[in-house]
Amino acid sequence: MSDKSCGPVARAVLQQCLQARLQVKAAQEHCDAEWVEVGRGMVIYVCFFKGATDDILPKMVSTLLNLRLCESESGRMVSVLELPGSVLVVPQATLGGKAKGRVMQYHNNIGKEDGLRLYTAFVALCQQEVAGVTLKHGTYGNRQVLKLDTNGPYTHLVDF
Amino acid sequence: MSDKSCGPVARAVLQQCLQARLQVKAAQEHCDAEWVEVGRGMVIYVCFFKGATDDILPKMVSTLLNLRLCESESGRMVSVLELPGSVLVVPQATLGGKAKGRVMQYHNNIGKEDGLRLYTAFVALCQQEVAGVTLKHGTYGNRQVLKLDTNGPYTHLVDF
């Protein structure tokens, strides 16, 4: 299948936020749910496809964190690191879906084990890069209960 | 350029919501900002590329409104119309961007005049299809100030 060799191995959707709150642990019988929260900055939704390897991660992290997508006080477009803003990473396997009739199919998504490994490495590499900027992230495999407050999400798609 | 003929002519990003609030008119000297609000349902971010024509709209609307992406009370996946849920349409030209170095370029985006015409027709066609379901939409060309409350956005991308 020719499109397998030229299709993306990872996908990110970026949204700007004033504040974002993400559940990282669901409530249980004797425990309240746990949440992480970031202020002004960027939400990175991320998904890996079959064929993705660790090789792609440095380029992904460098591209996503350095794109000039944030409006500074003076109206100039700067990166989330330059702003400086916070970063919230959200694992989002649904991004790998393809519409087939009335359902989404996820045949190109990476397996759960490799997905978790790449996601964990992606977050760790982001942590290294952001140095001094707040970075929070969702729990792989969880339902990503998210509350988002924006001054315009300026939703972007970046395939790798 | 061969990729012009096979690239998408429109792009939608879908997010599930419990509630969403969108500014449709910015505050002015003697006027408060105006907002629209929807309850549980789906946010459709939409962007048109060069080459898009009205021909694509019926397929887009039918696909987006009938995809089974919403979890019913019983846990079954149903469409937003079957839920029944609300729909919020958000014009989002940034979805057409392509990363080039540290900036996003929008060379493939449709012109503003054609974009407004297609967006308006898209919203009108959605209105027709949803019959009885609440549909709200953003103002083309505005900053889309958005507040989103989700139980998991389950972000999907659908290209046309």
Image (cartoon, coloured by chain):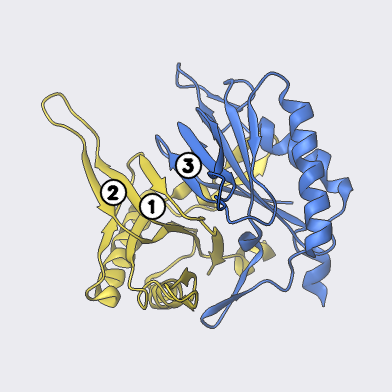
Chain colours: A blue, B yellow
Residue marked by disc 1: B91
* CA distance separating discs 3 and 2: 14 Å
Please say whether residue A61 is visible from this viewpoint: yes
Q: Chain of mark 3?
A: A
Query: Could you tell me which residue is drawn at 21 percent across and 35 percent down?
Result: B33
| Corner quadrant of residue B32 | top left
Q: Give the distance between the C-alpha atoms of the residues marked 1 and 2, in whole angstroms.
A: 7 Å
Q: Is residue B70 left or right of residue B90?
A: right
- Amino acid type assigned to the residue bearing label 2 in the image: Thr
Place of residue A121 in the rendered image (x, y in percent of width and height, measured from the top left) = 82, 42
Circle 2: element type:
loop
Residue B7 lies in what quarter of the image? Answer: bottom right
Q: Which chain letter goes with mark 1?
A: B
- Same chain for marks 3 and 2? no
Q: Position of residue B41 (x, y in %)?
A: 37, 63
Q: Residues within 10 Å of mark 3 (few under 14, many from 20)?
A: many
Where in the figure is residue B11, as x and y percent of width and height? 51, 61
Q: Is residue A14 visible?
A: no
How far across and how far down the image is residue A146, in percent?
50, 47
Find numbered disc 1 in the image and state the secondary structure of the residue it sits on.
Answer: strand
Say which residue label 3 marks: A154
Q: Secondary structure at mark 3?
A: loop
